[in-house]
Image (cartoon, coloured by chain):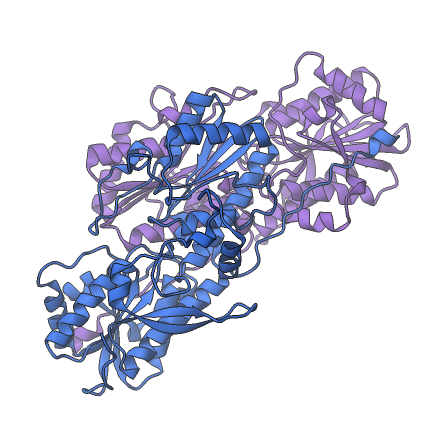
Chain colours: A purple, B blue
Amino acid sequence: MATTAQTRGGRGHLVIGQSGGATAVINASLVGAVRAALETDAIDGIYGARYGIEGVLNRDLIDLRAQPAATWDALRGTPSAALGSCRYRLREGDAERALDMLRALGVRYFIYIGGNDSADTALQLAAAARAADYDLRVVCVPKTIDNDLPDTDHCPGYGSAARFIALATMDSALCTEAMPSHYPVKIIEVMGRDAGWLAAAAALGKEREEDAPHLLYLPERPLTASEFLADVQAAYDGYGMVVAVVAETVRDENGRPLGELGHQGTDAFGHPLLGGAAHYLVGLVRGELGLRSRYDKPGDLQRMSSASVSVTDREEAERVGWAAVREAVAGTTGKMITLVRRPGPEYACDTGLTDLERVANERRPLPPEFLTPDGRGVTRAFREYALPLLGEPLPRYARLRPARGYDAQ
Amino acid sequence: MATTAQTRGGRGHLVIGQSGGATAVINASLVGAVRAALETDAIDGIYGARYGIEGVLNRDLIDLRAQPAATWDALRGTPSAALGSCRYRLREGDAERALDMLRALGVRYFIYIGGNDSADTALQLAAAARAADYDLRVVCVPKTIDNDLPDTDHCPGYGSAARFIALATMDSALCTEAMPSHYPVKIIEVMGRDAGWLAAAAALGKEREEDAPHLLYLPERPLTASEFLADVQAAYDGYGMVVAVVAETVRDENGRPLGELGHQGTDAFGHPLLGGAAHYLVGLVRGELGLRSRYDKPGDLQRMSSASVSVTDREEAERVGWAAVREAVAGTTGKMITLVRRPGPEYACDTGLTDLERVANERRPLPPEFLTPDGRGVTRAFREYALPLLGEPLPRYARLRPARGYDAQ
């Protein structure tokens, strides 16, 4: 879909929606969009759709101009989706109904903050507008902790989740290291779709061979019980402790999620509802190897934690929200804002654009150069890519030197 | 055990150990002890015992004077126990063996950072010294996220863990609130021994009736499957979503831990090895109520998270470490440092002393005035007690007002 000409109808209303899994910074994108809208004469009413496209279909909107001015600063630091989010897949006729509703209200601008599935929704809405010859500017704002959207250097939400997972692995591993004889095996379960972007972040705090994670299981490769047990035993023999990070989306050799709790069916977009791999693997370690094992499953904390937000991620999330409104006002439609990394040693990103068709239908896998040949570790190239996204440098923890002055006395 | 007279043997060495479950601030106590030792002429060598009392028994010590000076600032911000920790229960003759080892090295001061079990170890060591008429000053430094040591206002380690759990509940609940139709039921599993101090902290961010946690299960009262399911259904009917916080130590009507993974036996002190309640309850909700449910089990993150450390907790942890060395040098033995809250509206604590006999044998339960009559909620008195321990105020998250300007157009 090409960029259309400058607005025909002059001023119009803006509707903003948030969609898909929430993140710690998706509200920063909302704030960026609202602030850009407040600054332009092209936009009249500014509305938020409750629960994404469902709010449009149900005529459930919030007047964002009516919010107290202090809201926006506070919301910038509030995790999750303040408008409410959805995983609603449009049905036959929904796009046309949504368009009718928007047109009846005089809406000319539609900003949708979300991932692949949200791009699919936005694409259908843009197509309906074009078919109806109604000048609706539809621009998406990238958002996903899974970091798997195409054509953007990275996705807002990823940096904060990656920071959480990197810190969680560092912190939790220190606990295992302090008392390896008590609980020698720790398993940390990490979210992520079919690409291991987030689980790979567990290795970002690793500096020495013996640092955690000792084992890293990304969804790119299947994992069998026997391979896992052999790995754990070998790591235990080598380090006297094992911290294994496992993506909840890792499958076994038959393509089945690990652990029974995985089988809660699928969501509206056909994605399996997962969770339970670590619980299963802990039982396996205990039963088969006789090693005490426990697990951390941070669950929604990894997408939500306000204490681990990357300042870079939050700033970029606000910036892409801002850019989406500026682009829509300038005439852009059918696009998603992207982040484009500048070349050079100093980290910096500009915003760019890509087509919603691509976002709705493509997934960005972890490139081979980010993974070690065995698919069980990350490369220096990945570290150089990912570390700037985490904002402040990771803490440098101290260790004591094993000096033994008393032997000399 | 009474305070003994000023040192008979003049200068002597100091040994410091860390024991029991690690915390995010137990290293701050080590740093406080080391800094106090570096400032006094009474102490010659400063050694760290590797893995607590096991390091004494195995003559596995680290020379802390040999560490680079920058170590101490960095270690103050490093979670977990840098010396290594243990859950070793002294056997027949161990206390005498440990004493012989300390005496052979010329150690006059022994500082043990830990909880009830560590106090038991320290007490035996002090008794062995007294029986042998050897002037060993044994002083404990309180440490536990469980907050259940007697005679101290609170325990270093608790404030940071409580901050983590309060934030985790606030953050994760926002995720459920954003998409209640997708995953309406969230269960958060929290650590803690037989008193619900830490699980109770989940309510510290709750400001409105409809805020999470909607359900709070402390170990003070048993929980049956039927009661849990009825509670979840009622909360779901009332709020359209449910965030339930459950202590991993909650028992059923027969005194058994919830969930099969709980049955990993007991540790050296007879404490059951728990974990798995949330996994079990999620299956129950899904199977019996047909509601989609998932869980966060932060596990060791709640004791370790550097991003959620309470600045107050860290400062106090350092201070009690410092006080222990000062007390030992002044002649105190057989005691644990305590925190004594000053009366008045402004939060402040001084340090005090209590007998190791009491610490080794008593547990501090949640007082009745901190719990609502049904045992399923916390009172204002608990909030006033606990909030200052969390350091910086909890964040104030923004919510959008449901204003609907478009209806008027």
Measuring from the top left, give residue A197's x and y in whole percent.
48, 37
Tell me: residue B335, above or below residue A285: below
Residue A229: quarter of image: top left
Q: Nearer the viewer, residue A390 or B124?
A: B124
The reply to whether residue B360 is in sight is yes
Q: Split into 4 quadrants, where in the image is the N terminus of chain B?
A: bottom left
In this picture, residue A402 sits left or right of residue B71: left
Q: Is residue A283 left or right of residue A149?
A: left
Q: Is residue B19 above or below residue A165?
A: below
Q: Is residue B303 left or right of residue A409?
A: right
Asked which quadrant contains residue B345, the reply is bottom right
Q: What residue appears at the point 30 percent right and 75 percent down from the top-left corner?
A: B65
Spot the residue most to the front.
B373
Which residue is farthest top? A92
Q: Residue B5's quadrant in the figure?
A: bottom left
Residue B277, position in %: x, y? 36, 36
Residue A35 position, x and y percent, is: 77, 45
Above or below, comparing residue A192 to residue B33 in the picture:
above
| Residue A373 appears in the picture as rendered | no
In the rendered image, residue A215, in percent from the top left (x then y), is placed at 33, 40
Q: What is the quadrant of the C terminus of chain B in the image?
A: top right
For the point 55% across and 45% down, the residue is B170
B240 or A151: which is nearer to us?
B240
Total tally of numbered discs in the picture? 0
